[in-house]
Image (cartoon, helix red, strand yellow):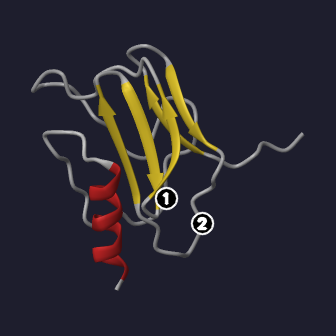
Amino acid sequence: MKATPKTLLWSGEAWYDAVSAMKIPENKWTYVAFTVNNGTVKIYLDGVEQFSGESFPNVFKNKNDVFALGVNYWDVPYKGMIDELKIYSRALQSDEILTEYNSNVN
């Protein structure tokens, strides 16, 4: 049985998977954003919310916490390009994410 492609956000602290059924397309610029606010995680692709879930651990609770992008313990690491990585000190609202996406489209 072939696995269904998906976008996954994972935290090993509490073994929580945030899964979007939308696959990030290959060979096409795609805007990806995620927010974590008081345990609520949201994943956005091209400015549109694709997933929302509760009880997600705080990814950046201490200044020495580790954040890995494009890799986990059991899959092949991401092979591609990442441009304009931004990390904010707060969770952006959905309208802010859409505005950010639209400012990068053109």
* Residue 66 image offset from top left, x and y in percent: 24, 29
Query: What's the residue at 35%, 51% (across, down)?
Result: 94
* Residue 46 image offset from top left, x and y in percent: 46, 64
* Residue 92 image offset from top left, x and y in percent: 25, 47
Query: What's the residue at 29%, 22% (across, down)?
Result: 38
Query: What's the residue at 28%, 75% (across, down)?
Result: 103
Q: Amino acid at mark 2?
A: Pro
> Is the residue marked by circle 2 packed among few (<14), some (14-19), or many (20+) residues within 10 Å?
few
- Distance from disc 2 to disc 1, alpha carbons, whole Å, reads 13 Å
Question: Which label is found at residue 50?
Answer: none
Is there CB contact under 8 Å for labels 2 and 1?
Answer: no
In the rendered image, the vertical position of residue 36 relative to residue 27, given as above or below: above
Q: Amino acid at mark 1?
A: Lys
| Badge 2 or badge 1: first in the primary sequence | 2
- Residue position marked by numbered label 2 in the rendering: 25
* Residue 58 image offset from top left, x and y in percent: 28, 23
- Residue position marked by numbered label 1 in the rendering: 79
